[in-house]
Amino acid sequence: MSHALELRDLSVRYARKGFALDGVNLTIPKGGVVALLGANGAGKTTMIRAISGLLPLHNGQITGGSIAMDGQSILGLPSHKLVRMGMGQVPEGRLVFKQLTVEENLRVGAAVLPKSTEKERMDAVYELFPRLQERRSQAAGWLSGGEQQMLALGRALVTRPRLLLVDELSLGLAPLIVRAIYKQLKLVGETLGASILVVEQNARLALDFATTAYVLERGRITLSGSAQDVANSDLVRESYLGVAKEGGAA
Amino acid sequence: MTATVLRSGAPRAAAPSPWRWLWWALAAAALLYLPILLTERQIFGFRLSNMMLLNIGLSQVNLMLITMLGALSLNYLTGSAGLISIGHAAFYAVGAMTAAITGSQWGWPFPLVLIAAGLGGALAGLLAGLPSLRVRGLYFVLSTFAVHYLVVFAFMEYQFKFFDVVGVPYKNATLGSWTLSTPMRWYFFLLPLVIVVYLLLRNSLRTREGRAMQAMRDHELAATANGIDVRFLRLKAFAFSSAIAAVGGALYAYYLSNVTSEFFGIQFAIQFIAMIIIGGMGSLPGAVVGAAVWLLLPSIITGLTAQAGDTTGLLRSVLVDHKPQLVQAIFGMLVIVLLIFAPWGIAGMATRLKARLTAWWSRS
Amino acid sequence: MLIQVLLSGIALGSIYGLVALGFAVVFKATDVFNFAQGMFVAFGAYFAVTTINLLGLPFPLAVAAIIAASAALGVVIHIVLIQPLSGRPMLSVIMLTIALSIVMRAVIEILYGVQSRTLSTPMPTGIFLVGDVRISQLHLVAAGVSWLCMAAFGAFFKFTSIGLLMRATADGHEAALVSGVNVKVMNRLAWAIGAGLAAIGGLFLGQLQIVSPELEHIGLLALPAVVIGGMQSIPGAIIGGLLVGLIEQLSATYISPKSSDILVYVLLLAILMVRPWGLFGQRELGRV
């Protein structure tokens, strides 16, 4: 039984910034939700880029290790192929197509689907996020932060991915909205049977949501385990949850 | 722009070793003997074939020296101010035009003509650099593109108003009573001039202002926060660079003794860009290398294709009938190849090679 | 008289608009300011001479061949030259396109010689007389075809799914990658379109003027057109082209034939100083 995603001994470096990941091991069990925690610059986004084939765009390269999705190596595969293989991504900063309408944004995501299923999948997304339906003819650039996040998520979900990568969902959004979106995400994940990797600076949020968790510090995994155990560890309590003798940064 | 930081020289440690003196002496001797070699075409009584001398004549070397002024000034501009000027040949035109007005029309003596050309170039550079206060990068490059067309148009109008379609004529260049009438005399005038310009530019880059400008080249906000208004430093650099190019243009005009506006077209301007890319952008040695390649390439190709005298058809068309085009094609491809594989140019490659050799030497 | 000048200005401007459109598509999609676009126009004209006059192909076939050859050339150039430079600063790529134009020009001169040639096509070259105004039929055809192509492209861009994917790629490279768009193919398509449209422009310009390497300079007028209109705006490019055509014709008639291009460059300079993002472009944060 292969995992949904397995990183083994993965090392990544950037052309001008030096090494970013060093011998990282991470697994996402089928149907599981994994949280990846870490401070700014720890390498979380780098990991997402390595998984989804975006490293070349940022002058980075994988210098060692392997990445396998459902037991199949995906090292070096281009992004558009990965999407077709069932990988969906909600990138950091949302990256919606600002000049295209909401509907067009979703259609771009749905472009990998056969024409016949397109409408039904898009309707499913509208059902999930009724706000998007209200704004379907509006240019995405005019949406609020929360709506853009929903759109980015919807664009990824329209293909019914089996592996979903979510990068910094909470950035720039009000906590209430974030919680609501996460709730939807959990629902969708369970319905689709998708496996989810959540990268989050907001540790509390992520740990509430995930089943297992990893902590990334300066390119290395320093802690891993069930979400509960990780949440209760001293490291996380002090550095990421703000429960500390001196008040660590969250 | 790739940040080619000009090295302002190694820390002034020990005095140059005896090896360095020997090297300089040899170089000086070679440079002094070169014109004789190229004119006599024999060394110690041993006749040299054209091929051995790479088909180069002294007049081509002179032209290279004049072009070197353009390449040096352009690389000074890119290296210090980070501004790329596609229309650099326009300043050649400005120099030629100023020389025509002061020399051919008003009859000023040659040295004064050159000074006038320099001043004219500086003024033109100041004006042409004004857009850099407002825009940078691509937009600025486009503004130089537009300026080029305008200047060449002005030259054309001038040419047709005061002269005719044949071109603008120039008198002989005389320094006092000494006329630059032979290639040898031109050589011994141009060589020290180019060396002086090189040193001037190099020192300008080493001043506090020069280094500040380079360091701040890509970081506008840091610069203004530091209290140095880089924008005006850049304008100064542009004026300086254009002044030198204008002097080059005046020399060009006098050397050819007749020029038309077509000489300064965008094709010529692009040659300079190609030169500095081949040599190495932003580096003064790179400008020298680039100009040298520009000189050598046609001669080498002529030499090589001389072997192909008996071919027919397309090959003949390429190698024999269309030599200037072949040169251009190879020139362009050289630029492309370098941009893809070695964007730091030939001089840059040499620097890296030297660094690697030094490292290897110090390790073994 | 004025009407005539205006009409020929609009006709030429339509052709420039077409070439500028091709340029803008490439710029929006791949962020490359293609200085070799002028040579693509020249190549189009020379392809036309070859297929129509030298090979004597039937006209529709020749046109198809011209467009196909140019598009293929565009794709090849993207694969061989542009792709290896992805991620490099924009100015490096610009210089690459300048070097490319040097090579392309040399190739044309080697293959076809430096002399200019005439291009004769089955397109009508007569004159319509409407009252006192003489309207060149070729101008009419050129303008008509240009507008047709621009409209066709507009429809393609707005209404087809590939057009949607191209718009998405132009909107955000990374976003497109993340959404499963095959950005490489989109980029190549953009270059194919850019070169193809330039070639059509070359076909007309070659017949309206003369087929010589100097066509490069006429084709290069697309650059100020795009900048004046607004580099990030496709309608801006088209309007820029019209403006350039009008200015060219007006100054050629009322000032002097030699000065026809100068006012265009004066306007370019003025726009760069006053409103660099063009008439219809959007202001970008910070200086480019």
Image (cartoon, coloured by chain):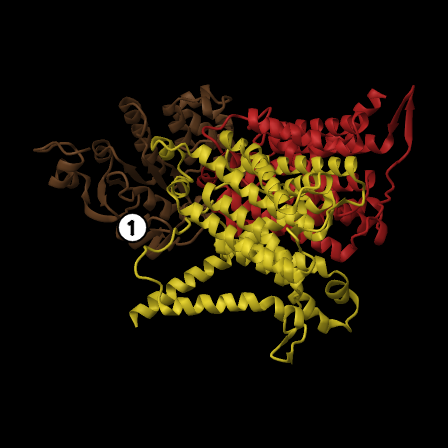
Of residues A115 and B293, which is closer to you in this image? B293
- As drawn, the chain in red is C
On screen, residue B292 versus residue C264, left or right, reads left
Of residues A31 and B221, which is closer to you in this image? B221
- Quarter of the picture containing the C terminus of chain A is top left
On screen, residue A106 versus residue A89, left or right, reads right
Q: On the image, which quarter does residue B265 sit in?
A: top right
Label 1: chain?
A
Q: On the image, which quarter does residue B44 sit in?
A: bottom right
Of residues B95 and A205, which is closer to you in this image? B95
Of residues C105 and B8, which is closer to you in this image? B8
Q: Position of residue C6 (x, y in %)?
A: 79, 23
- As drawn, the chain in brown is A
Q: Position of residue A88 (x, y in %)?
A: 40, 40
Looking at the image, the residue that sits furthest to the left is A245
On screen, residue A81 versus residue B250, left or right, reads left
Q: In this picture, is B339 found above or below C280? A: below
Q: Residues within 10 Å of mark 1 (few under 14, many from 20)?
A: many
Q: Which residue is mark 1?
A: A21
Q: Residue at x 46, y 68 (%)?
A: B25
Q: Amino acid at mark 1?
A: Leu
Whether residue C75 is visible, yes or no, is no
Q: Residue at x 67, y 59 (%)?
A: B327
Whether residue A165 is visible, yes or no, is yes
Q: Position of residue A152 (x, y in %)?
A: 41, 31
- As drawn, the chain in yellow is B
Q: Residue at x 32, y 40 (%)?
A: A196
Q: Position of residue C99 (x, y in %)?
A: 61, 51
